Amino acid sequence: MTSSSPAKSLGARRWVPLIALAAVAVVCLALPQVLSSYWTDTITTWIPLAVAALGLNLLTGYNGQISVGHGALFGVGAYTTALILNEWHWPFLVTVVASAVVCFVAGVVIGLPALRIKGLYLALVTLAVATLFPQILEQFSDTTGGSAGLGITNRELNRRGVMTDRSIRFEPPDLALLSADDAKASSQWRYYIFLLVAAICFLLVRNLVNSRAGRSIIAIRDNETAAEVSGVNVAAAKVFTFGISAALAGIGGSLSALELARVSSGTFTLVLSLNLLVAVVVGGTPSIAGPAIGAVFLGFFTNVITPEFPEDVKPLTPLILGVLLVVLMLAAPGGIVGMYRQLQARLAARRAISQTAISQVP
Amino acid sequence: MPLLEVTDVGVRFGGVVALAGLSFTIDEGQVCALIGPNGAGKTTLFNVVSRLYHPTEGSVRFADIDLLGLPPHRIAPLGIARTFQNLALVPGLSVLDNVVVGSHSRTSGGFWAAALWFPQIKQERAVRARAMEILSSLHLDHLALRPCAGLPYGTLKRIEIARALMAEPRLLLMDEPASGLTHGEVDELGEVIRRLRNEHSLTVLLVEHHMGMVMGISDKVVVMELGRKIAEGAPAEVQTNPRVIAAYLGEPVADAP
Ligand SMILES: Nc1ncnc2c1ncn2[C@@H]1O[C@H](COP(=O)(O)OP(=O)(O)O)[C@@H](O)[C@H]1O
Ligand SMILES: [Mg+2]
C-alpha cells in the first residue's frame, strides 16, 4: 500500500509528545528528591501560578476574552480557602474544590457583562476589578485581615497539652518516597499534592479544548458568526468559559493560600494579574503546555534571577520584566510554544508529509 | 405546504432599504436560485433566515415554525445550514475541525463531559469519520489536517459547503458558492450541488451570478432588485422576462457616462 509509509511516520511522530510528557513527569517527580526544602518550597509556589495561567490561557488564548483581573479571582480563591479553613476546618482538598466553585460563580458574574463589552474595554473593566480588589479587602479588614493579613490556622493541642492556634501544615504520610526529616517530608508531600492537583487541571483543560465544546470556544474567538450559525450558543459558551477560567484561577489561589498559610491584601494586586498575563504570553497561546512553561519562566525570573540583581537595580525588576516581555513578543509572538511549533512545522515541511489525513483520524 | 415561506419581509439599515416586502416560497426538494444585481438584498435575506438580522416587518416560516421567534443558534438544529459569501471559517482550526464544527447541532456533550473526555470518544470518532467522508465527496480529504490559511478561495468555499453538510440540513443556503472558481470548476460545482441535493435529500436556496449554472440546476428562480422581487418562475420563464432583462442589461447602460 502506498499510504503505509506516511501513516507510519505520522504514528511515530505521535509518540514524540508522549515521550516528552513522560520526561517532564519524571523531572517533576524527581525535583523534590534532589532539591533542598527551600527550593522545593520555592518551586511549589510556581504551581498555583501555572494553574491560574492555565485558566487565563483558556479564556484569552482559546476564547479571545481578555482579562487583566485574574489576580483578583486568584485572591478570591485564596480568601475562600483561608476563611473556610479558619471557620470550619474542612480538609484541604475540599477547600480547593470549594474555592473553585466560588470562583466559578464569580467568573460567571464577570462573564455576563463581558458579553456586552469586548476587546480593550473588557481589558479596562477587568483592570478595574484587579485594582479595586486589594482596596475592597482592606475595606473589610475585620474579616480579611487587610494588609496585615490573615493567618490560616488550626486549633491543636501543643506539647504541653494546651489548645493553641497553629499554622496549617501538610502532614506527610509514612512513605518511603518522602524524606526521613519531618519538615522536609512535609515540603515534599505538599509539592506532590500540588503537582497532582495541577496535573488534573491541565488534563481536564486539554480534554476540554480538544472536544466539541473546545472547538466551539475556538470558533467563537475566531468567528462568532460561524459558531452561532453552526448552532453554538455563543453567550452561554462565553460565560461558561469565563466561569471555568475563574475556577482555575481560584484553584491557583487556594493552593497558594495553603502553601503560605497566610493571605493578605498585598499579595493580590494588579502586579499578580499582570504576572499571570506575562506567564500566558511568554508560554504562548493558545496552548496547554504554554501556561506551565510561562509560570516556570516567571518563577525562575522572580526567585532565581531577581535575587542576583544588585541592590540598586532591584526596584527596576518590573521594568526589566516588561522590557523582556516586549522583546519576546517581537521576537516570538507565539511565545515559547509558538517557537517550538514553528520549528516543528519547518521540520515537517522538510519531511513533506502532506498526505493521508485519514490515518490521523482516531 | 412549502418548506420555507418568506412573507412580506422588510429590512432597513438606517435610510437604506435592503429588503422591502419580499415574499416567496420554496418547496421541499427544490433547488431555488435567488438572483439579482449586487445590493439587491440577497445576502440580507440569508442573514434574516439565519437570524443574524432582524427584519422590521414580515414573517419567515420553516416547516411551519416561526423562525423570527428563535435566537440564531436555534436555527441549525431545525435543519437549516448555510455558507457565506465572504467566508466565515475559523482560522485557528484545521480544515477537518472546521468541518466538524458544523456538526455542533447534531451532537451532544457540554463542558463537563468534554473535560472528562471518555463520554465523548465514540461520538468524536463518528463525527470525524463523517467529516472525512464529506470532505472526500468534495475532493478535499487530502487537506483535512491543514490549517485553512493559505488555501485558495474556491477551496475555502467548498470547505464551507462541507461544514454546512455536517449539520445534516433539510435546507441548505449557499451564498455565491461559485465565486473564485474557474469555468471548469463552476460546471463541476453545478454537478456537485445536484448530486448533494439527491444524496442528502436537500432543499437548496442558491445565490449565484453564474447564469449558466443557475439556469442549469434550478427548479425555480427568484429575481430581486433593490430589495424587491421583480420576477419568479422556472428558469426559462425568467430568462425571457423583460423586467429581468432590463435589470441585468439596463444597469450598465444606466451607469455609463
Ligand atoms: N450590515 C449592514 N449594514 C448596513 N447596510 C447593509 C448591511 N448589510 C447589507 N446592507 C445594505 O443592504 C443592501 C443589500 O445588501 P446585500 O444583501 O449584501 O446585497 P446582495 O447580497 O444582493 O449583493 C445594500 O445596499 C447593502 O449596502
Ligand atoms: Mg451578497
Image (cartoon, rainbow, N blue to C red):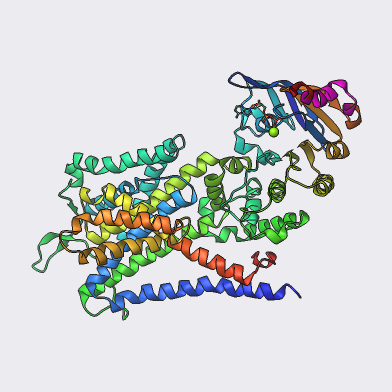
Q: Which residues are magenta?
A: B238-252
Q: x, y percentage for residue A155? A: 17, 59
Work out whether residue B63 or residue A311 is closer to the camera in this orientation and state it: A311
Q: Which residue appears farthest toward the front when viewing the image?
A: B257
User: Does the rendering let one see residue B104?
Assistant: yes
Does B115 appear above or below B249? Answer: below
On the picture, is B95 further left or further right than A123?
Answer: right
Where is residue B230, by image quadrant? top right
Q: x, y percentage for residue B93? A: 58, 54
Work out whether residue A231 or residue A99 is closer to the camera in this orientation and state it: A231
Q: x, y percentage for residue B109? A: 57, 51
Where is residue A297, by image quadrant? bottom left
User: Does the rendering let one see residue A96?
Assistant: no
| Residue at position x 81%, y 38% in the image | B210
Q: Main secondary structure of the magenta part?
A: helix
Work out whether residue A326 or residue B107 is closer to the camera in this orientation and state it: A326
Q: Quadrant of ligand 1?
A: top right
On the picture, is B148 further left or further right than A19?
Answer: right
Q: Quadrant of the C terminus of chain A?
A: bottom right
Does B84 appear above or below A148? Answer: above
| Residue at position x 68%, y 68% in the image | A359
Q: Quadrant of the N terminus of chain A?
A: bottom right
Does A226 appear above or below A56? Answer: above
